[in-house]
Amino acid sequence: MTIFSKIIAGQIPSYKIAESDKFIAFMDIEPLVEGHVLVVPKTEVDKLFDVPDEFLAEWLVFAKPIAHAIEKAFDCKRCGISVIGLEVPHAHMHLLPIHSSNDLNFTRPKLKCSGEELKAAQQKILAMLG
């Protein structure tokens, strides 16, 4: 069972942004930038291109309002998306407020955020999801 499956099962707390029967979105606890959200299918599949076909389009549709909320909540040019999949063997996409493609450089050091900082970022996004 991956750490994401444990979050989905409620065994590990998270700063949830949205949830459906197939997907969940929550704050990354080691973000590259403030406002970094993970969007995860509830089905535990390691690689993006092994996710069932019927999930792929729905995944982006689920993520779309979250991306718009991130763009409204944070000073950025747009919400970037990245799928890397090396750290956790459970398919997931990263949504981040970005100014340039360098903001999606996952070799950069991650931020060390307090629970209060993560909660504040979560609340900014939730306020824009309306």
Image (cartoon, rainbow, N blue to C red):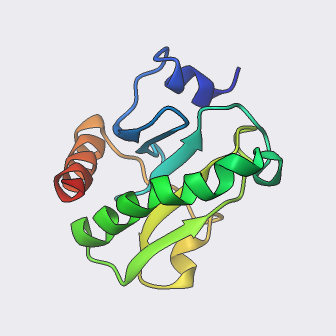
Q: Nearer the viewer, residue 50 or 30?
A: 50
Whether residue 5 is visible: yes
Whether residue 31 is visible: no
Q: Quadrant of residue 15?
A: top left
| Residue drawn at x 51%, y 25% as measured from the top left | 7
Q: Residue at the right extreme?
A: 50
| Residue drawn at x 43%, y 56% as measured from the top left | 36
x and y percentages locating residue 41 in the rendered image: 60, 40
Q: Residue at the top extreme?
A: 11
x and y percentages locating residue 84 in the rendered image: 71, 58
x and y percentages locating residue 8 in the rendered image: 52, 25
x and y percentages locating residue 49 in the rendered image: 81, 54
Q: Quadrant of residue 44?
A: top right
Q: Quadrant of the N terminus?
A: top right
Residue 70 relative to residue 92: left or right:
left
Q: Nearer the viewer, residue 61 or 112?
A: 61
Q: Is residue 1 above or below residue 94?
A: above
| Residue drawn at x 56%, y 80% as measured from the top left | 102
